[in-house]
Amino acid sequence: MKKYQEYKQVNYPEIGESILSYWKENEIFEKSITNREGAETFTFFEGPPSANGTPGIHHVMARTLKDIFCRYKTLKGFQVKRKGGWDTHGLPVELQVEKELGITKEDIGKKISVEEYNKRCKETVMRFKDEWDDLTEKIGYWVDLDDPYITFDSKYIETLWSLLKRLYEKDLLYKGYTIQPYSPAAGTGLSSHELNQPGTYKDVKDTSITAQFKLKDQENTYILAWTTTPWTLPSNSALAIGEKLDYVKVRTYNPYTFDPEFVILAKARMGAYFNKKAADLKVDDYQPGDKLIPYQIVEEFKGKNMLGWEYDQLFPIEGLALAHPAFTVISGDYVTTEDGTGIVHLAKAFGADDFRTLVQNNVPGVFVKDEKENDIPVVDKQGKFLPVVGEYLAAKMQEHGINAHKAFGVDDFYVKNYTEDDENQADYKNTDIIISIILKNENKAFKVEKYEHSYPHCWRTDKPVLYYPLESWFIKTTAYKDRLVELNKTINWKPEATGTGRFGNWLENLVDWNLSRSRFWGTPLPIWRTKDGSEEKCIGSIAELEAEIQKSINAGFMTSSPYEGKELDLHRPYVDDVILVSSDGKEMYRESDLIDVWFDSGAMPYAQWHYPFENEDIFKANYPADYIAEGVDQTRGWFFTLHAIAVMLFDSVAFKNVVANGLVLDQNGNKMSKRLGNAIDPFKTLKEYGPDALRWYMLSNANPWDNLKFSLDGVAEVQRRFFGTLQNTYNFFALYANLDHFVYSEGKVIPVSERAELDQWIVSKLQSLILEVEESMDNYDATKATRAIMNFTVDQLSNWYVRLARKRFWRGEMSADKQAAYETLYECLSTLSQLMSSFAPFYTDWLYQNLTQALDKKEESVHLTDWKEADQSLINSDLETSMGLAQTISSLVHSLRKKEKLKVRQPLQRILIPILSETTRKQIEHVEELIKSEVNIKEVEYIDDASGILVKEVKPNLPVLGKKLGPKMRFVVAAIKSWGQEEIAEIERNGSIEVDADGEKISISVDEVLISSQDIPGWSVASDQSITVALDVTLTDELKQEGIARDLVNRIQNLRKEMGLEVQDKIVIEVKTDQELVEAAILNFGDYIQTETQANSLSGSKELSEGTALDLDDFDVLVQVKKD
RNA sequence: GGGCCUGUAGCUCAGGUGGUUAGAGCGCUACACUGAUAAUGUAGAGGUCCGUGGUUCGAGUCCACGCAGGCCCA
């Protein structure tokens, strides 16, 4: 009965499948959690995916990354609960449903009821859940799929409401304005999605003005700013510059009034405002009316220097005056020199950038008060100036004698073309033109021209869009900005730059969180208001809602609860049917907004447990998260909303460690897309390569935070090179262990100190590996860990240990040495199965089963084991250095043999190694036997000072000398390079030597130089950084004979194999040769040949007629091999 | 336009705190091994470290400005 299953071939996808069903049958995942009951918790939060599309290969990356640290921490003894989750609300679902139903947003509530529509959304959003679950299982991502949190669930929404209410009570939830695209013709806001419809952007010709803003307290000096929306100029409250841009002050004349003046603009924009032909004209020679206007730069400065400059309000309209810092120069990060003057006019009400920049600089905007004392812009929702501006413009028209196609009353100043006036009639003037003329007349315009540009239009009315302040609900994140920044610094970001840069900078420039969405499928905002806005209620729970409904029924506003006798659903439209009653008995209606879906996911730490309504203990034990991971594109999404809610409501971080992974691109570095056909199907890949190689490839190929250029060849390589090698190593072990009936028995093993040096070495390496993997994983660096494991497995274990130890497994009966070799190899394999199990969960469990099937004491799965700590007493760095030397020396000898065309089978007498220190000598002596057998030589000779043939070389120790000498370095370096053997001997003898450095005497000590051995004169040598090896290439007859004997063994082994003999079969050999050297070889090395080939007899014969002719380089031999 | 990331061999990637001859794997070439065998080993060839300038005795590494690609945001 074989104790260790042997495999001719392994099928990795099959291993994946069989282990998966083993896990399911035996509930291994569940046990990995229940096993750790009472242990310290390690908390992981699942960022919820949306299941309304099929999963891609990049999800394998993200989910693997999530999985590995949870598995690792479980092995380490933590209890790691991980609840799955689904993101179910939001625009993508709605758009998909609209598309499938062939409707638009307008139709919802008309062609289809909101109830029906939301039902469709709910169905659609989980459409691909099965596929997702399938992938999750197949790639071995352990997460609780049976009891996930779902964001549309009523309990989930109830938690959101309670959080919103807490924000509301802390005065952090408010109704404000945000600048949004708005269609005055349709009277409605437009979403960015509506703006992205084809045909929305059209090329139009608008009147553009470069206005002159007069600097305060400076005569005739103006800042120039350009706009394509002159009607926003009365609302100007600041000017923005780019701090790094170059600006000039130019002496010139106004082209309309011919007044002499100084204007300020970006240097790079001068070409657009001044005629080059006028460059040589004298400014003083100008006569009013001259076509060419001369100009002269009188000053140059950076934008930064302009910050804080004050200027006079362009339209000094009574009632629109503003306090400082209005009408000053501020910094705008988006200012460019691509068009205009490099100076941007800002109107708070009519541009999102303007609004943000002004708010950040605490500059007030131009508004008037309505009857409720609210700020409203000077353009109304029909797109028409309020009378306060209208009066001013009308008066100015009179003053300047401006005639138009019609008489303008105070209420006739529409901005854009929202009137139906015929633009072709005589004297047609729109508001922009009227403003232009006024400014020209008042020396406030430097240039007025028609400008063609692309501008968005309302898809329904075809009229231009207005950027306009619309009401929205906000979370006042800015109130907590400092705390958000501060707590972010305690989070361990991988990579760090995402935390300090991308996320940190974003926090530094924080604006309030716009929570409102005008859609249907999402979490409703739980705020009810009276019609006049005098009273508000924020509902924080279902119980509270029901109580309020009861009050409302009592007040007669509702006849019954819409939830009576129905399953509770907090979505629209049901929640919209709830009318509440105010304290003074007025009707209250719900604010129609839904909330941003990012609030849904950012609230998952609380909502997944229905906290605070339930599970307080679970919540408290699992908050904040120790670890989360998502794509770097979530920085301003999930990462931010988690952080914001945690800081604002719990004064805590939501997560302590976060890995932000990059994108998965195709192998050429292009984004994968189904449309381009370069997307990789994860299911197909899994079927072909199995989950382990795929996971391993993704983790080891590049750091997860770098983009991954995904290549199937790369997966294949990992499978072949790494898993293949490991599997070969296991097969080797199993083959011989079964032959020798070896079974590993813990507690009865030979102590490592009593095992062979080679064993001690690999065990030492293994302990070092455990430490390295631990350190990397504790630092959330999986790539480092996987690479270390690969290096150990392939280079150390397989290519060195197994190769050198092979013979110990082969022959003879079981011995202590053999036992030690088995135990050592077994320990390496079983330790690897655990070390690797986080990354390659299927294969390692399979390996673990194979290794432990003969044991009495074992776990059901490698994933249920306890982490085997490194035994640091077994780390022998001296031995590791020795073995390193052995590897280097062997490699050098191999390269010498190649150069001399002497194959390894030909034994050679000796190698010479120059030795500079006793330590090195001892380290090499330690592994001398190993070197000798590895490169097939008889002796190692050491050459030291006493030998008299050692030639040394000296180099400056630059890092040491550099600090001491600085600029004098080059003299000293030159001096040291000129040294011969005498100087080297002197510094070794005296410990120091004096050097002339450009006339100065400098003492150089022996530790400031590096002495190494050089060529041995007359020998063939090879050297590495620190070691030189010479090879004695003399071939004696005896060496030649031994070479022949080895050749013969080699050929006979081949014959045995051709004959199909088993390892243990015995043979008889007859050899015919007329070469003396061959005969001598058979005579002198007959025993060796027989032992090696398992021959019972070996005889030389002159008569042999049949047999195989062998070509031994220099000789021909006839050999006959028979089974005995 | 802004923030952040990346750029090293044909390909995928390593290269604390600046230091002498810039490394690994794959691929390629040659050889070896043939009792791990549809495996394995060894050696070799292969580099403008994206560019330009700067700091320094010394720069792949630090600084500035660019170029190319990417992500997020405008």
Image (cartoon, grey):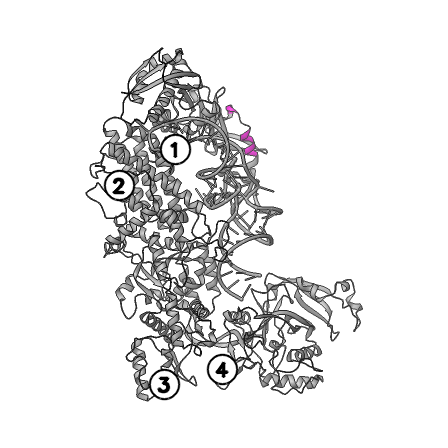
Name the residue rendered at 35%, 23% in the picture: A1055
Q: In terms of image quadrants, where is residue A847?
A: top left
In the image, which is nearer the foreground, mark 1 or mark 2? Answer: 2
The location of residue A614, given as percent across then percent down, is 27, 69
Question: If you read the primary sequence from the N terminus, does the residue marked by circle 4 or circle 3 appear first?
Answer: 4
- Main SS type for the magenta part? helix
**Which kind of residue does numbered mark 1 sit on?**
Gly
Q: Are marks 3 and 2 in contact (CB under 8 Å)?
A: no
Q: Are marks 4 and 3 on the same chain?
A: yes
Question: If you read the primary sequence from the N terminus, does the residue marked by circle 4 or circle 2 appear first?
Answer: 4
Range covered by the magenta-colored residues: A971-982
Question: If you read the primary sequence from the N terminus, does the residue marked by circle 1 or circle 2 appear first?
Answer: 2
Disc 3: which residue: A582
Mark 1 surroundings within 10 Å by alpha-carbon count, few (fewer than 14), some (14 through 19), many (20 or more): some
Mark drawn on residue A884: 1
In the image, which is nearer the foreground, mark 3 or mark 1? Answer: 3
